[in-house]
Image: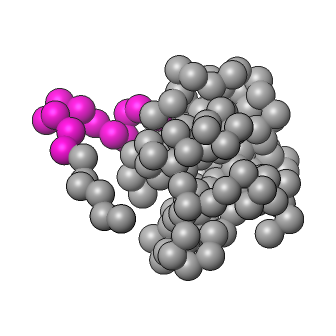
Amino acid sequence: KQYRKVRYPDNFHTSECLFGFDDCQKGADFLIVVEGAREVMKLTQEGFPNAVAILGAFLGEKHVELITELHPKKIIAMFDGDPAGAAITTRSATMLKNNFPGERIQKCFLPIGRDPKTLDRDQLSELIRGEK
């Protein structure tokens, strides 16, 4: 199903906000970072409420600052299963590792043509547990 792209107001900067930020629990076991708002809604419906969207394919410094405010124990980068998604997964994990030491960053590479909103609870659980 094709969706229309969202047109944001001129003074709205996606690089300065995280969709779902206010609904996340601080200090949670994990935080899932995705591209779009629909993915956050799907994750919440499937029982994974600690998810935020960067609203695009670029993780910026402000995003990292906001993620830091949430103090997650682990950060899971779960972007779309396409070349752009694989690239942002790698870039964001590298950027986040600079701010979150140790093994706190997990990269989830989805199959080509898939994104988090197309996965069911069991598939998401496997990715989150690092089984796929």
Stretch in magenta: 7-18
Count every numbered label the image shows and give the total.
Answer: 0
Is residue 63 a member of the stretch shown in magenta? no
Image quadrant holding the N terminus, namely bottom left
Front-most of residues 65 and 1: 1
Q: Is residue 30 left or right of residue 3?
A: right
Q: Is the residue 83 above or below the residue 131 in the image?
A: below
Q: How would you classify the magenta stretch by its main secondary structure?
A: loop
Front-most of residues 118 and 72: 118
Q: Quadrant of residue 46?
A: top right
Q: Quadrant of residue 111?
A: bottom right
Q: Residue at x 71, y 37 (%)?
A: 47
Render colour scheme: one colour
Q: Quadrant of residue 101?
A: top right
Q: Position of residue 13 (x, y in %)?
A: 28, 36
Q: Residue at x 53, y 20 (%)?
A: 22
Q: Position of residue 89 (x, y in %)?
A: 59, 62
> Can residue 98 be seen?
no
Q: Position of residue 36 (x, y in %)?
A: 44, 48
Image quadrant holding the C terminus, namely bottom right
Q: Residue at x 38, y 33 (%)?
A: 16
Q: Is residue 103 left or right of residue 8?
A: right
> Can residue 26 be seen?
yes
Q: Is the residue 118 above or below the residue 55 in the image?
A: below
Q: Position of residue 37 (x, y in %)?
A: 44, 42
Q: Is the residue 38 above or below the residue 129 in the image?
A: above
Front-most of residues 52 and 40: 40
Is residue 16 a member of the stretch shown in magenta? yes
Q: Residue at x 25, y 54 (%)?
A: 5
